[in-house]
Amino acid sequence: MHRQKIKVPSVKITLIAIITLCCIFSSSAQDAAMSELTQELNDKLLNVKGKGFFFGMPDATGYGVGWNNDNDRSDIERVTGDYPAFAGWRAER
């Protein structure tokens, strides 16, 4: 009796297929789960694409060179005339 070999896809191909499918389904799920405000931000970012660039920095307001405790000031705004597009702050206790 002659045994017939069954070809099993390699582990690499299987993992690539799983990762690809997860990316496809997760991105569509993320798009559906976007809040209205998030979608509006996403649309604005896409509208500016190719027309310029966004600049961001941590702790953009609140303190700077020679000043502090003023959330309406920014060293970036003083130099460029505009606030950073993105700002981040570290939450501490």
Image (tube, helix red, strand yellow):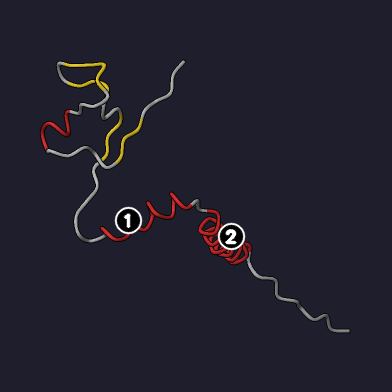
Question: Dot 1: what SS?
Answer: helix
| Drawn side of residue 65 relative to residue 28, left or right | left
Q: Amino acid at mark 1?
A: Lys
The residue lying at 35 percent from left, 33 percent from top is: 88
Write down the residue under mark 1: 44
Question: Dot 2: what SS?
Answer: helix
Q: Amino acid at mark 2?
A: Cys
**Front residue of this view, candidates 71 and 2:** 71
Please provide percent x and percent y for residue 57: 27, 34
**Front residue of this view, candidates 59 and 6:** 59
Please provide percent x and percent y for residue 47: 29, 61
Please provide percent x and percent y for residue 55: 23, 43
- The quadrant the N terminus occupies is bottom right
**Answer yes or no: do the residues labelled 1 and 2 have beta carbons within 8 Å?**
no
Q: Quadrant for residue 14, please give it.
A: bottom right
| Drawn side of residue 89 relative to residue 54, left or right | right
The residue lying at 70 percent from left, 75 percent from top is: 7
- Indicate whether 67 appears above or below 30: above
Q: Quadrant for residue 82, please give it.
A: top left
Instruction: Report, in whole angstroms, how far the alpha carbon at label 1 lies from the one at label 2.
Output: 27 Å
Q: Nearer the viewer, mark 1 or mark 2?
A: 1
| Drawn side of residue 91 relative to residue 88, left or right | right
| Drawn side of residue 37 relative to residue 73, left or right | right
The residue lying at 16 percent from left, 34 percent from top is: 77
Write down the residue under mark 2: 22
**Front residue of this view, candidates 11 and 25:** 25
Please provide percent x and percent y for residue 89: 36, 28
Q: Earlier in the sequence, mark 1 or mark 2?
A: 2
- Indicate whether 9 appears above or below 45: below
Q: Residues within 10 Å of mark 1 (few under 14, many from 20)?
A: few
Q: Quadrant for residue 24, please give it.
A: bottom right
The residue lying at 29 percent from left, 27 percent from top is: 59
